[in-house]
Image (cartoon, rainbow, N blue to C red):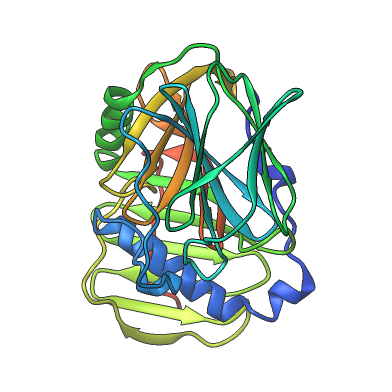
């Protein structure tokens, strides 16, 4: 099972992204603060339209991915494959020509709702999702899988029980550019993030400080409501959880688990420690949010103080 890219070679921030640091940094914090409150990413903050994509079929294994700037997901179960396609603005994309290929076998998909496409395909092992106007996406389907709901639930509790957490986040809205951010969280309500070469913020209870880039002056404001940290990146909703396999991250044995948060919607793959149930790696696909987490410190001597 492939382990996500280590932090040392995470996405490098492009010069075009640097010009958008303040807006994107705010967007990062909006999504993060929603997770801190135990919920999901605010749909209005992602510019999601009124139409909503259907939730994954009950009991289906769900894998998230990206096709250019589009977020996509594949659900496999009961002899069918179902794709969900979202635009960068967040609305489900309907009216596309969609097909699925498993080796030489190709089947045409039919609409199953807003941004939803489905076809019969029993015993698929590697499904190539082909979309009009975008690059195909290949999903590898495990030969067998078991429920991962209990593992994700324990990972949620393990994350919330931490006294502190530090992780590195790579976040893109499309194939190029993006942000590389270090997050530090100290229970119950202290947060600091630093975007490489860009914006940073410190939040302590109801107080917060922001600056656009290193060396600039800090601006003080209120943080209402106060954050509750640490919280899992997936919020409080996780459906369609399945164990894809086992692997190792930094020498530690992990379960590789896929699941969805259909209220966003967002699709996750997590590498969860088999001993203490802490997430060590995380990947997320959502509208204009292609994200990877590398968790680097748990319950360490992390201190977050007001800026000088």
Instruction: Report the side of 155 relative to 144 (left or right).
Output: left
Towards the viewer: 273 or 103: 103
Q: Position of residue 202 (x, y in %)?
A: 41, 70
- Residue closest to the far top: 144
Q: Position of residue 216 (x, y in %)?
A: 59, 85
Front-most of 68 and 205?
68
Name the residue at 47% across, 75% down: 26
Image coordinates of residue 239 in percent, x first then y, are: 31, 37
The answer, for residue 138, to whether it is visible in the render is: yes
Looking at the picture, tell me which residue is in the foreground, 69 or 291. Answer: 69
Identity of the residue drawn at 70% across and 55% down: 132
Quadrant position of residue 178: bottom right
Could you say which quadrant of the image residue 49 lies in?
bottom left
Quarter of the image with the C terminus in it: bottom left
Q: Quadrant of the N terminus?
A: top right
Note whether 214 is above or below 184 in the view shown: below
Residue drawn at point x = 43 percent, y = 50 percent: 266
Query: Hey, which quadrant is residue 133 in on the image?
Result: bottom right
Which residue is at the front of the view, 281 or 75? 75
Above or below, 95 against 292 in this view is: below
The number of numbered discs placed on residues in the rendered structure image is 0
Relative side of 98 to 189, left or right:
right
Where is residue 278? Give x, y as percent: 38, 30
- Confirm whether residue 291 shows in the render: no
Horizontally, residue 109 falls left or right of residue 298, namely: right
């Amino acid at each position: 099972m492939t382990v996500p890219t280590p932090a040392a070679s995470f996405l490098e921030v492009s010069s075009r992204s640097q010009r958008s640091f303040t807006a994107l940094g705010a967007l990062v914090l909006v999504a993060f603060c929603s997770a801190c409150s135990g919920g999901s990413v605010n749909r209005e903050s992602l510019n999601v339209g009124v139409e909503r994509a259907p939730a994954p079929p009950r009991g289906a294994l769900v894998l998230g991915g990206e096709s250019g700037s589009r977020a996509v997901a594949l659900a496999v179960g009961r002899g069918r494959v179902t794709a969900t396609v979202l635009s960068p603005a967040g609305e489900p994309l309907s009216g596309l020509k969609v097909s699925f290929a498993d080796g030489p076998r190709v089947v045409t998909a039919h609409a199953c709702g807003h941004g939803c496409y489905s076809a019969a395909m029993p015993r698929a092992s590697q499904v190539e999702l082909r979309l009009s106007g975008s690059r195909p996406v290949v999903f590898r389907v495990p030969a067998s899988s078991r429920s991962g709901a209990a593992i994700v639930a324990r990972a949620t509790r393990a994350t919330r029980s931490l006294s502190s957490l530090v992780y590195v986040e790579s976040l893109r809205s499309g194939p190029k550019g993006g942000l590389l951010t270090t997050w530090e969280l100290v229970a119950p309500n202290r947060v600091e993030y630093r975007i490489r070469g860009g914006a940073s913020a410190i939040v302590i209870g109801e107080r917060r400080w922001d600056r656009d880039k290193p060396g600039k002056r800090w601006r003080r404001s209120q943080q209402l409501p106060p954050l509750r940290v640490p919280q899992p990146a997936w919020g409080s909703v996780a459906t369609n959880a399945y164990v894809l396999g086992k692997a190792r991250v930094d020498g530690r044995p992990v379960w590789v688990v896929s699941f969805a948060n259909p209220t966003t919607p967002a699709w996750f793959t997590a590498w969860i420690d088999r001993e203490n149930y802490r997430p060590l790696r995380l990947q997320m696909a959502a509208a204009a949010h292609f994200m990877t987490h590398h968790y680097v410190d748990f319950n360490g001597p992390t201190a977050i103080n007001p800026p000088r």
